[in-house]
Amino acid sequence: MNKSKIYLLLLLSILVASCIPKKDLIYLQEKKTATNEIVTPSNQNPYRLQTNDILSINVKAIDPKLVAIFNNTEGAAATGNVNEQSIYYNGYSVDDHGNIRLPILGEMNVLGFTVEEVRIKIEKILLDKYFKNEAGVYVVVKLAGFRYTINGEVGSTGTKILYQDKVNIMEAIANSGDIPITGDRKNVKVIRRFPQGNQTFSIDLTDAKAVNSPCFYLQPNDYILVNPLKQKTWGTGKTGIESLTSIIALISLATTTYLLLRN
């Protein structure tokens, strides 16, 4: 085999290896082994509160004046003009002991409770000690925004807050500017906090079966990490044309340097 064929083969090998295949860029593809079986994701159990969570609690009644003393959501939060700062100052933060401190009711332990269990607990205390059923008292308890952190190869990194009860990883990534062509969609990491410690999950977002992963639906305070593909480290280009351009430029530079040295 002559030198020209060897160089051509080497060039083609580098070109193929440096390209990012289309199948690595498409989300939720139906693989050959995919079935139509419906599987309930294992993490669809209600979220249980942990320290540093912030709750939004609002006590309501037929006559709002009767329960005004039990609320501290004044100003922006009360008018519906809710922002991250007002949530931080007007919400109820779960302290290191798992307690929140409510007006009149005092400290209440909520560690490990669901928001629905907290709602039932507060309503029971109010009806047992302060009001009759005729007052029409009811309580609304929500997490003060769904908070997650995302880092790595995404359009916008950082801690994000979505004002909805459930968030899946596709929504979280879309809210963060999507994964660029240089991001590894096949091995996205999700680090989740549990009372006994942290656990790391991996999910392949190019596979339709990802919807059945225990980390497809996020939990509050999840940390998402998207690593770069090896092609970005090589710096050869994201597509075949880019790779070919980079290789030609490198060969041209090497040839020019060789000719200059000869002279």
Image (cartoon, helix red, strand yellow):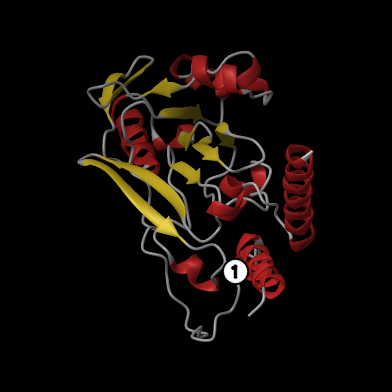
Q: Is residue 165 left or right of residue 104?
A: right
Q: Secondary structure at mark 1?
A: loop
Is the N terminus in the top left, top right, bottom left or bottom right quadrant? bottom right
Give x and y (percent) for residue 164: 58, 43
In the rendered image, which quarter is residue 24 located in? bottom right
At 76% from the left edge and 59% from the top edge, which residue is drawn? 244
Q: Residue furthest left?
A: 196
Give x and y (percent) for residue 16: 65, 68
Q: Is residue 200 left or right of residue 195?
A: right
- Between 145 and 19, the residue placed more toward the observer is 19
Label 1 packing within 10 angstroms: few (<14), some (14-19), many (20+): some
In the rendered image, which quarter is residue 158 located in? top right
Is the C terminus in the top left, top right, bottom left or bottom right quadrant? top right
Q: Is residue 258 above or below residue 10?
A: above
- Between 103 and 181, the residue placed more toward the observer is 181
What amino acid type should be assigned to the residue bearing mark 1? Leu
Give x and y (percent) for residue 181: 67, 53
